[in-house]
Image (spheres, coloured by chain):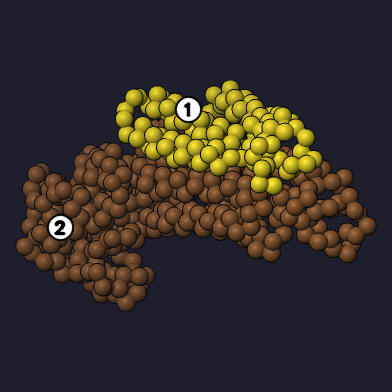
Amino acid sequence: MSNADSHAHDDHHDDHGLSHVASAKTLLATGGTLLVLTIVTVLATKIDFGANINLAIAMVIAVTKATLVILFFMHLRYDKLFHTVVFTSAVLAAALFVGFTLMDTSQYQQTNIWNNQSPPLAPVGPHAPTG
Amino acid sequence: MSAAHEPHSAEHGGHDDHHGSPFIQHHYDDAQHQFDSGKLGIWLFLAQEVLFFSALFVAYILFRVHHGEMYSYAHKWLQVKFGAINTAVLIFSSLTAAWAVRAAQRGEKNLLIACIAVTIGCALTFLGIKYIEYNHKVHEHILFGKYFDPCVSPGGSELLTKHNDCAGTKSTIEWSKANGAIDLDTGNATKGCFSVADLDLDPHTPGVQADCEVSEVQGEGGTGAGRAITARCPEEKVGESAGEGEGGHEGHAEAPHFPCWRPAYQPAVCPDLTKPDAKLAGVGSQPQVGILVEYGDDQEREGISIKATCKKPGKPAEGVDAGASTGGGGLGHKAIAPVHELTTHEEHELESLGPPPPNTNMFFSIYFAMTGLHGVHVLVGVFVFIWLLIRAVKGQFTPDYFGPVDYAALYWHIVDLIWIFLFPLLYLIH
């Protein structure tokens, strides 16, 4: 089985291993890139580009890191397409979840749970406490 | 599949097509069928995990969109150092987990054992660092919901509440909301609070003292029960650097006789969220006047509540610093020096930011929900990898049977993946 690497893209798994064997180089390069990106994202926070751009940079780096993990550590690049479909559907469903919830939120009154500057107004109506 | 297989066990003897590992179940066509079924299963589970965590990400995003200010304030309580180390630890463990799969596929037993062991070690390191972080927050009451009661006051002075017993304090302040508030009109100790307008003081002025003539301060309960605390704390200079908490007393010529008391102005940072009516009326979030008692390092302070009585106040002595040892007359205005040593750079920054914005406790509700759920996943991962380690030592993983290693590694990568997002979202807010 020591020559399993050479059959990495073999569609017929019958003879040479059950799935793709990641090469040492790929794993090390992925791990190294992830660590470098971690340092980059920490350093990027120290520079003020404006709150939104800082957030965008952090998210771009996070998505890049996530993609590297998925493609190489999780072998999705070499795996069956159906696994990609399963995982991508979950991410899309999560995106819909966030998107639709955000569309809806301005329909509700703000609730002050903890505000020392402007305490909520005294309640009025039949259920208001009488003092 | 000719190499490195285990001898057939008796119950598999009838399935000659299932050559290789005895763990290949007879209801599968072959090793490939079993592996692919398991792999589909774990990918469906991972999809479920994404949806599972997405609920918390929705909460995070909604609060960030609507209450961005609490994120830019509260993230300073989190230490980037710990988050970054944990990110690196998880990435490295992800690498070793991926390498474990490779080793299993290539039939390298010792390398497989080593990779699994390192992964477990990394997971435990992660949990250890998380424990340090959580422990700090529990100690400082930087917690979720109504347990959010941190040691921060406006304008750079530190005033602890009765709930706080913060690390690094040289003295503890007892603040009794029930007994310690002093009605400026009647001079009696009352329950409840005072509005800023009544005091005519700026709540953002550091350590402003109320004008109130305190006649008696007594400890109740504990070992100091019934003992009058007569000593006044020595005067402290206005504008002393808040960061030099230790020097507040030591730099002074007059050594304090602990326990001593001083009148105190309670800034509006610690509302009592336990009382729904108080929360509704907003009274808990008003500044209060009270007594601040400082104890020596070794003095018993558990279970003592402070009772103070207050005479009718004199007119505010504008800009007059009354002598600390006189014990009478208008107290004027003076600063409360910090008694709590801030432990992180970020917390020092918080000092200059004033009180936390509204709903800041929600940040920590979200923080603990997200990192807590993630931590539970790490903990589960530890047990899974221990199980794999035992099986690997027994030599049960072979090139034709390594599914469990692959599936566990995939699970571990998704745990890493979630942390890759949690780290910038919680720790790296600009």
Please say if B59 is above or below B403. above
**In the rendering, what colour is chain A?**
yellow
Choose between B346 and B260: the one closer to the eye.
Answer: B346
Counting from the top left corner in percent of width and height, residue B106 is at 66, 49
- Which one of the lettered chains is coloured brown? B
Q: Which residue lies at the image location 14% right of the left edge and 66% below the top edge? A: B256
Q: Which residue lies at the image location 78% right of the left edge and 35% below the top edge? A: A12
Q: Which residue lies at the image location 90% right of the left edge and 60% below the top edge? A: B13
Please say if B324 is above or below B353. below
Choose between A85 and B292: the one closer to the eye.
Answer: A85
Q: Is residue B268 visible?
A: no
Choose between B174 and B81: the one closer to the eye.
Answer: B81
| Position of residue B53 in the picture relative to residue B304 (left or right) | right
Distance in Å between CA atoms under marks 2 and 1: 45 Å
Counting from the top left corner in percent of width and height, residue B76 is at 35, 42
| Position of residue B257 in the picture relative to residue B110 (left or right) | left
Residue tagged 2:
B247
Within 10 Å of disc 2 (Cα), the crowding (few <14, some 14-19, many 20+) is some
Q: Quadrant of residue B225?
A: bottom left
* Residue reaching furthest to the right: B14
Helix, strand or loop for disc 1: helix
Choose between A125 and B214: the one closer to the eye.
Answer: B214
Q: Quadrant of residue B166?
A: bottom left
Helix, strand or loop for disc 2: helix
Please say if A112 is above or below B335. above
Counting from the top left corner in percent of width and height, residue B383 is at 62, 59
Q: Is residue A12 visible?
A: yes
Counting from the top left corner in percent of width and height, residue A107 is at 57, 24
Rendered image: mark on residue A60: 1
| Position of residue A97 in the picture relative to residue B195 (left or right) | right
| Position of residue B395 in the picture relative to residue B131 (left or right) | right
Type of amino acid under label 1:
Val
